[in-house]
Image (cartoon, rainbow, N blue to C red):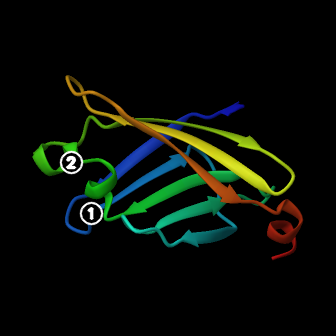
Amino acid sequence: MEKQNIKVSHDKEEDIISLFREGSRVKFSFDLALPKGDIVLDYDFNGYIVGLEFFNASSYFPFLKKSLNTSNLKAKMSIQYGSNWAQISYELSLPNMKPVSNLINAPYNKKLILEH
């Protein structure tokens, strides 16, 4: 499983959380339309997932509704790749709050991403 140095940002007004690998450049994005809100996967120029964006983020991370200050948000993300899938494990936390973690299983086609 690939571990990454992850930065996190929160747009409270738009209710969006972004997790991204430091120093990465995005080549391609893929939108997963889910009942809680869309999740956008960002891919780099080598075809690897380097970021996640959670729309309607407070439905994924309920503690955001109660938190006035999210400047101390911490995130972890790791990714395991298969031949046609990627499993993304993520965790988001604030000091003195229980972290929220989950998995996303997404379609993955490195060849298609690199050709895009």
Residue 54, image x, y percentages = 41, 59
> Which numbered dot is residue 64?
2
Q: Which amino acid, mark 1? A: Asp
Q: In which quarter of the image is residue 45?
A: bottom right
Is 104 placed above or below 91 here? below
Q: In this view, does 40 lie to the left or right of 55?
A: right
Is 73 placed above or below 113 here? above
Q: Tag 2: Cα neighbours inside 10 Å, few (<14), some, or many (≥20)?
A: many
Element assignment for label 2: helix
Residue 78, image x, y percentages = 61, 36
Is 62 placed above or below 56 here? above
Q: Do the residues labelled 2 and 1 touch (CB within 8 Å)?
A: yes
In this view of the protein, which residue sits in the foreground, 89 or 27?
89
Q: In this view, does 74 lie to the left or right of 76?
A: left
Mark nearer the N terminus (2 vs 1): 1
Placement of the N terminus among the 4 image quadrants = top right
Placement of the C terminus among the 4 image quadrants = bottom right
Q: Is residue 6 left or right of residue 23?
A: left
Who's the residue at 82% across and 47% down the image? 82
Q: Name the residue under label 1.
A: 15
Residue 76, image x, y percentages = 49, 34
